[in-house]
Image: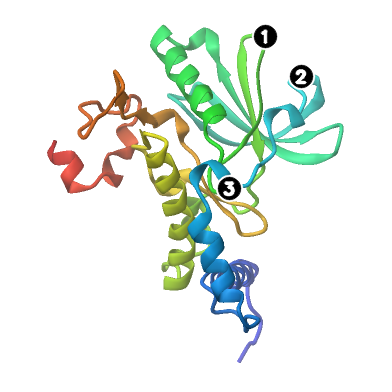
Amino acid sequence: MSFLVSKPERIRRWVSEKFIVEGLREFELFGEQPPGDSRRKTNEASSESIASCPKRDTMSSFLPDSSCYELLTIIGRGFEDLMVVNLARYKPTGEYVTVRRVNLEACTNEMVTFLQGELHVSKLFNHPNIVPYKATFVAENELWVVTSFMAYGSAKDLICTHFMDGMSELAIAYILQGVLKALDYIHHMGYVHRSVKASHILISVDGKVYLSGLRSNLSMINHGQRLKVVHDFPKYSIKVLPWLSPEVLQQ
């Protein structure tokens, strides 16, 4: 009988255990709390507002210059195959980042408007569970979008590589809690996301959950009034159809 465990299995167990520990901490099930700490947290939560979300790194923290980034391997593609996603190294600090490069010359005017809307929303939103844009700039004929490198990739990557038999309920609850916090913030800001799917849920090396896919966000404010129904389908989002609820598809 062999007690050796394959490398993929070791990775799967390590990732699973990390989620379990982070999840227990998040749900206040990990360790004992000091007396009075629970009440203090409740008071802090009740006084917290959308406007008082923790400040994150701004775009000015990374230089908008393509020469500052060493492009490494390609880790993804998208946006009608006009976008290439690279793992890159930010030369001034040596930090690993993700660089999305979109070929603007091949984009239609409608696509460019679509991208402009994404950049506007990225500057407007400020929440710890929404992926922050470190820098955005145009290099030659390409739009570059620099974000933090998510070591665990997306929830889709985890399911396809390490959790092919399914994640534990605690890991799922922990990931969804981060997603719901992001969606609650987006809705309070007067927007709907319209593209919540596994590939748009990213997990960093320290287990933090981030929601991406800001291109599909749509404002619910029209002429100063908040809309109750959206009669608009996100463009270039055929792949999101399997993730939509029956109620949305029925519209």
| Sequence-earlier tag: 2 or 3 | 2
Q: Secondary structure at mark 1?
A: loop
Which residue is disc 3 drawn over?
A: 128
Task: Name the image quarter holding the C terminus.
Answer: top left
At horizontal 35% and vertical 25% (from top left) the residue drawn is 236
**Among the 4 quarters of the image, the one containing residue 86:** top right
Q: Position of residue 12 (x, y in %)?
A: 57, 68
Q: Is residue 194 left or right of residue 153?
A: left
Between circles 3 and 1, the one closer to the viewer is: 3
Q: Is residue 55 left or right of residue 76?
A: right
Q: CA distance from mark 2 to mark 3?
A: 26 Å
Give the residue type that dot 1 points to. Glu
- In the displayed orientation, state which residue is furthest to the right: 92
**16 and 25: which is toward the camera:** 25
Task: Indicate whether 77 appears above or below 198.
Answer: above
Task: Indicate whether 38 appears above or below 238.
Answer: below
Q: Position of residue 77 (x, y in %)?
A: 52, 32
Give the residue type that dot 3 points to. Pro
At horizontal 50% and vertical 21% (from top left) the residue drawn is 82
Q: Secondary structure at mark 2?
A: loop
Q: CA distance from mark 2 to mark 1?
A: 11 Å
| Sequence-earlier tag: 2 or 1 | 2
Around disc 3, counting alpha carbons within 10 Å, would you say few (fewer than 14), some (14 to 19), or many (20 or more)? some
- In the displayed orientation, state which residue is furthest to the bottom: 1
Which mark, residue 140? Answer: 1
- In the displayed orientation, state which residue is furthest to the left: 250
Give the residue type that dot 2 points to. Asp
Between circles 2 and 1, the one closer to the viewer is: 2
Q: Secondary structure at mark 3?
A: loop
Q: CA distance from mark 3 to mark 1?
A: 32 Å
Q: Position of residue 192 (x, y in %)?
A: 35, 36
Which residue is disc 2 drawn over?
A: 65
